[in-house]
Image (cartoon, rainbow, N blue to C red):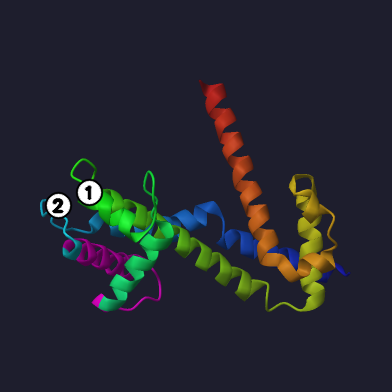
Amino acid sequence: MTNSERKRAEGIIGAVFEKISEEYLQLRIDEPIEKAAASFEFDQTAPVTHQIFTQVTGDFVRHVYEKALWGWQKMSPQKALAEAVAILEEGYQAAHAQGYYAAFLDASNPSLDGLESVLTQMARHITLMARARHIRWVCASRIELSDWPARCLIAEILLQRWQPFLPENVRTCSPAQLAHHLPELINVVLSIDRTVSKVLEANIDFCDF
């Protein structure tokens, strides 16, 4: 391994982590989605029938995707509704149930917060999906196009830097084994980094108190 090869691998790692840092994701993904969701308007006084529910959730998805997510062109109402159903099926969690029909029952229940609460969960799930898609794209464009020696070197550097914090089943792998799974390894490292940051922030808050 030459110094130039190591610098190149470290440069790739630095570029990846810059583009998937919490600050970057909040600025480029979370905040635009939050603003788009906040700007969405619907008639909150109308009784939530199934027709109203499908209309509003579909319109909400189309509004958020067109306003906040890169590369999205205008969606047809049919496509937006299909996407809304998929988001609710995968991402909506009620007190005792989950999925599309649980969301509809919550939205139509006068004792709950109606559609507003459902849209809040939808926005949260859209954010999670957008983050995951962005991270996959960054890894694909920066790492998966690298040659095999570079991928092994990237895995070696990540192991050296994060070994004390990695799960045992990861620590015992060789760089060559992990070179096949660099996106997964980066996700593990990213999760550890965020956990450490939260612990440090909590300690600072406690000390300030």
| Horizontal side, residue 110 vs residue 25: left or right | left
Q: CA distance from mark 2 to mark 1?
A: 8 Å
Q: For mark 2, give the secondary structure.
A: loop
Q: Disc 2 or 1, which lies upstream in sequence?
A: 2
Give the class, few, some or many, for how many residues have Cα within 10 Å of label 1's Cα (few <14, many ≥20).
Answer: many
Residue at mark 1? 114
Q: Is residue 69 magenta?
A: yes
Residue 152 in which image quadrant? bottom right
User: Which amino acid lies under the numbered mark 1 shown in the image of this protein?
Assistant: Gly
The image position of residue 131, as x and y in percent, is 49, 61
The label shown at residue 66 is none
Q: Nearer the viewer, residue 163 or 53?
A: 53
| Horizontal side, residue 206 vs residue 57: left or right | right
Work out which quarter of the rendered image holds the N terminus and state it: bottom right
The image position of residue 28, as x and y in percent, is 44, 61
| Residues at marks 2 and 1 touching, judged by CB atoms closer than 8 Å | yes
| Horizontal side, residue 51 vs residue 204: left or right | left
Rendered residue at 30%/66% (across/down): 61
